[in-house]
Image (spheres, rainbow, N blue to C red):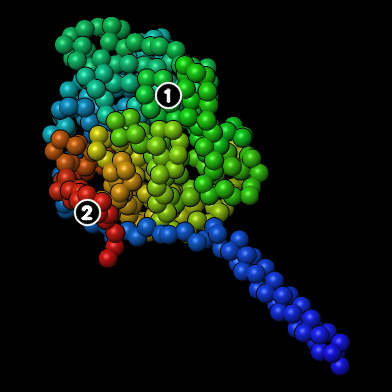
Amino acid sequence: MLWLFLNFLNIKAMNIFCLKKNYLTVFFLLVLLSCDNDVEITRVNPIILSVEDAEIFRIEDEGIETAFILDSFLIIKSYYDSIKIHVYNKDNLQSITKFGTVGMAPFELPNSRPLTNASITQKSNRILFYDTRTYQFKTINLDKYLSGSNVAECITSTPMDNDLVLATSLAQLDNNKFAARTSQPNQGMFYIYDTVKKEKKLIDYTPNKNVDELSKGILYHGLLNANSSKNSLVFATHLFDQVLFYDLDGNLQKKHVFSPLKMPDLDRNPISGSINPFYYTLSTYATTDFCFVNRACQQFSSDFERPLKPSQLLAFTWDGVMVNAFELPAVSTMSRFDICYDEEYGYLYSFYTSMEENDPHVIVRKYKIGDYLQTNDNEEFENK
């Protein structure tokens, strides 16, 4: 009888242990399955900017590659024009001058898209560009040119480090360090490179999806901006709806996710390499105090008959606080759509290229948004 009783207790104990083990197994499976989706979503309640709120200007240009504010000037790097640098009065957008012919000489500029402006505000009216076609840093002394000097004396070139020549995006962290990304396999989401020590630190993928290396090279495209005085680096991914803040050593400090992180549908077309997400980053812009991310709320499409949706402009401080968001009027998804911000007077400039075949031009909308960017210490904007 005693043996039967002890055996009964042993069976009950085994059953309880197995039951607990099964519960634990199910629990851990649920955790593993939900880990990609268990992400805090940053809520957005944008201020709506209508066309009626803007001063509207027309620029006789066929397209803008990039634009930024420098003192009293609006500087535009033209996409189609054979003269690349266009200088406007930032108040009334009247043309002042344009210069910089296409070519491979040290004082010339390329006609290809890889020319981009430096990551943070320009200093002393010297404009720094990364020319990844000739693998040169181009420095333009705007003051010298406007004072009447020959353009060959105002544009100088210095060689890029060999380990940066394949970069698809560059952000300068200090005199010796750069953040960059590349489509090469096994290079991380982006990397930080010290040109003196010749050291490269790879930054791991976030979120780290289980896909082949070729797909990772396509999936993790994004735009880098840096501010050395704030010890901050921002990476806005094109296809995952997130904005990531790092320190200059590559340590993740803050993550904003704006919709559930889903795997975008991969288009295996080897020529376009395109992916068609619903949300994606259109462009970014950096100033001394803010970093802006222009976020599309519609899929890229060549269907001109499809109804268009507005985009959202997210404004962050360099420590990762989102201070406000703005809804910008809809434009064609086939248009170039860029923004820049005048930190001195609080004006946002949004640009889009007209798609009219016989009348190529650029429309500029100028909004006063500076009053909406007043920040309180440690108080983050969110939808309440």
Q: Amino acid at mark 1?
A: Lys
Give the residue at x 50% y 32%.
191
Q: Secondary structure at mark 1?
A: strand
Most extreme residue toward the front is: 2
Of pointers 1 and 2, the one earlier in the residue sequence: 2
> Few, some or many C-alpha atoms within 10 Å of disc 1 (few <14, some 14-19, many ≥20)?
many
Give above or below for 19 relative to 47: below
Left or right side of 125 for 250: right
Q: Position of residue 347 (x, y in %)?
A: 18, 41
Q: Which residue is mark 1?
A: 177
Q: Position of residue 10 (x, y in %)?
A: 79, 81
Q: Which mark is residue 27?
A: none
Give the residue at x 54% y 33%.
202
Q: Nearer the viewer, residue 104 or 241?
A: 241
Q: Nearer the viewer, residue 30 or 289?
A: 30
Q: Which residue is mark 2?
A: 49
Regarding residue 146, the answer to whether it shows in the image is yes
